[in-house]
Image (cartoon, coloured by chain):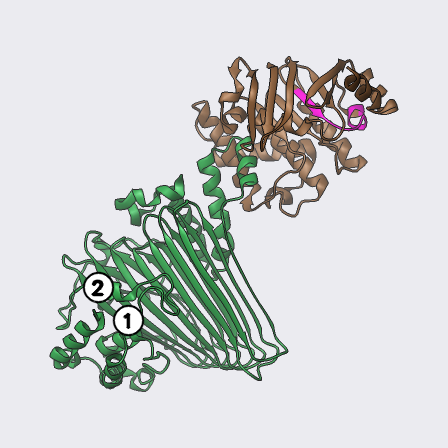
Amino acid sequence: MNALQQYIDLFKDNRSTIENGAPAVLNAQRDAALKALETVRLPRKGSEDYEATDLEAVFAPDYGMNLTRIAFSGDAAESFRCDVPNMSTCLYMCFNDSIVAGPNAVRNAGGVVVETFAQAAANHPGVLARYGSLASLDDPTVALNTLLAQDGLLVYVPRGVVAERPIQLVNIFNTTQPLMAVRRILVVLEQGAQARMLVCDHTQNKDVDYLASQVVEIIAAEDSVFDYYDLEESSPATHRVSSIYAQQAAGSNVLIDGITLTNGFTRNNYRISVDGEHAETTLLGMTIAGDKQHVDTHTLISHNVGNCHSNEMFKYVLGDQAVGAFAGKILVKEGCPRVEAYQGNRNLCASPEARMYTKPQLEIYTDDVKCSHGTTIGQLDQEALYYMRTRGISADEARRLLMQAFMADVIDGVRLEMLRDRLHHLVEKRFNGTLAACSSCQEACKGLRG
Amino acid sequence: MLIIKDLRASIEGKEILKGVNLTVRPGEVHAIMGPNGSGKSTLSNVLTGHPAYTVTGGEVTFGGKDLLALSPEDRAHEGLFLSFQYPVEIPGVSMVNFMRAAINEKRKYFDQEPLSASDFLKLMREKRAVVELDNKLASRSVNEGFSGGEKKRNEIFQMAMLEPKLSILDETDSGLDIDALRIVASGVNKLKSEENATIVITHYQRLLDYIKPDFVHVLYKGRIVMSAGPELALELEEKGYDWIKAQVDGE
């Protein structure tokens, strides 16, 4: 079987439909994407970098796509209640695969641009031209996304502009038939620009199978500051394959935080290229998974120059038969002195059947650097549990408090205050099984509660 | 209040308690002394329900209930408290959340409404004063980065919050300087009443200068081998345990 073939056939049969209305800059990449796909296969479980994850199986079903771009409509206010209230954001909604400005969207002043690729093709073609400059077609899932992408969201912060309000994009799956959505984000920050972005994934129809293919490119120029928070609260039947690429110039400060509270299958790739001195990179992740949730993270932070600093920490709490995987590489190339790079992956297996696969890697070709990695997989501290119980705290509540405490430092790493407070609350709800997003799958949280 | 009859317990197959008998009535203070490895800490862990210990015989009734049949949390709700020899650090769980959970679970056990936020904070403030516990410590993670003395003070603070019927103080004097010892002991004495009782487990007479026992027991090789009034503690301080060991081992 070759799951890719159906997409290649689909593309060849419908190329003009796909390209019709899509910006030229997207169409210009399709030949290269097609060429890259014709000689590869999707990785199967057990292959290099996919020890626990079978992408062939994820892409094999015929999900169906919205090639003719029938506009999905939705009354955003009606159908969606944001889990991060009280946050005044510049809000955009992506219904399945169609982006629209959200209700009550508050725009940023000072020339911050948030628009669809279709709009950007007319208004900011020079910026949109950077589409595809980071995403690597060597990754078949990225090539597939590039082959089929028809639109996306551009965030462009011009030189020196500080976007006061966070930019929020809410991806929502809600159809009656299975669907594959091809989503794309391009972020361009010019010198000294600052912005924060929150992307939330939700699935409203929990009975339908979905596949989201997401590629994000972040280009951070000199001395720019950018936060990217990715909050996933989808359904057991939602599959997501996401790749985030970031390129950092000198003095830039980029934070990327991937949070999964509920999902079905998730593969998150992070590829960060540090190209300028005195750049700072923070890469954080938090996964809480029960039931048969599957969350696989793959990271590469490549230090291509000296005098830069990266800090990476991913934490997992797994219950029931959940499967977690983490593979992270820090690369310090030759001639990059005084790099400081730290990587951590800490995991709690709260049930006997939960599985965690982890593979930390340092690859260092320069002598004068400070780098470390640390990985742990364990259970809850039995002495702490006993201590709490002697104070009258029930075993369930004690476990919950300890699991929340385990996640506290990654939540505190969030630099967006409203989101940080909300995350403490959401995580508490997730652990006591009352998270709204999993109201239809109460069972999913059992292993984490008991 | 507490009646222990022929209590036997083991850990990893090794029998540590070999038939302990002890009765504690309301208002009493009992001191349990004994050489290292005699089973003092095991006794307190078995009474509070540490999962690593297995009770192999005997019975314990507490306030008329079969203590050994209760979970550790229900033992706490019924009024049993252990001040740990080595209080556990719990990074990421704030003292406030920890105490709120403890107080409200106890209230739930007795079908009471949870304490309001303001009443809870008022209670915290009031009880902190008992052991002169700094507000800063109360806002930190449980025991994390506390000095030895602060940890012990924190134990007595928790005792003040939970108002137990029976408190077991396991080597509460270890690791304390003389000032901290005085503060901790005075906290314990302030909490003492006609209705509650205390078991003080200690190596040394020193603590007993501050917390006056009504009875002193010597635990040796898993059994209480001698019980007497407070004068026994002074005698032990002077003569050590060898004469008791010789007496018991000679039998």
Q: Chain of mark 2?
A: A
Q: Is residue A88 left or right of residue A22?
A: right
Foreground of the two, A208 or B49: B49
Which kind of residue does numbered mark 1 sit on? Answer: Leu
Outermost residue toward the front in this view: B250
- In the image, the segment drawn in magenta is B198-209
Q: Is residue A323 magenta?
A: no
What colour do you see for chain B?
Answer: brown
Same subunit, labels 1 and 2: the answer reads yes
Q: Residues within 10 Å of mark 1 (few under 14, many from 20)?
A: many
Residue B118 seen = no
Left or right for A114, reference A359: left
- Front in this rendered view, residue A304 or A432: A304
Query: Chain ID for label 1?
Result: A
User: Between residues B123 and A14, which one lies in front from this camera angle?
Assistant: A14
Q: Earlier in the sequence, mark 1 or mark 2?
A: 1
Residue B181: % across, % down: 76, 33
Relative to A204, is A64 above or below? below
Task: Please name the amino acid that badge 2 sits on.
Answer: Asn
Residue A425 location, x and y as percent? Answer: 42, 48
Work out how far the residue at label 1 is from the one at label 2, CA to CA, in angstroms: 24 Å
For the N terminus of chain A, the image quarter is: bottom left
Q: Position of residue A345 (x, y in %)?
A: 49, 60
Q: Which chain is green?
A: A
Task: Point out the frontmost of discs 1 and 2.
Answer: 1
Label of residue A42 in the image = 1
Quadrant location of residue A5? Answer: bottom left
**Residue placed under numbered mark 2 in the picture:** A96
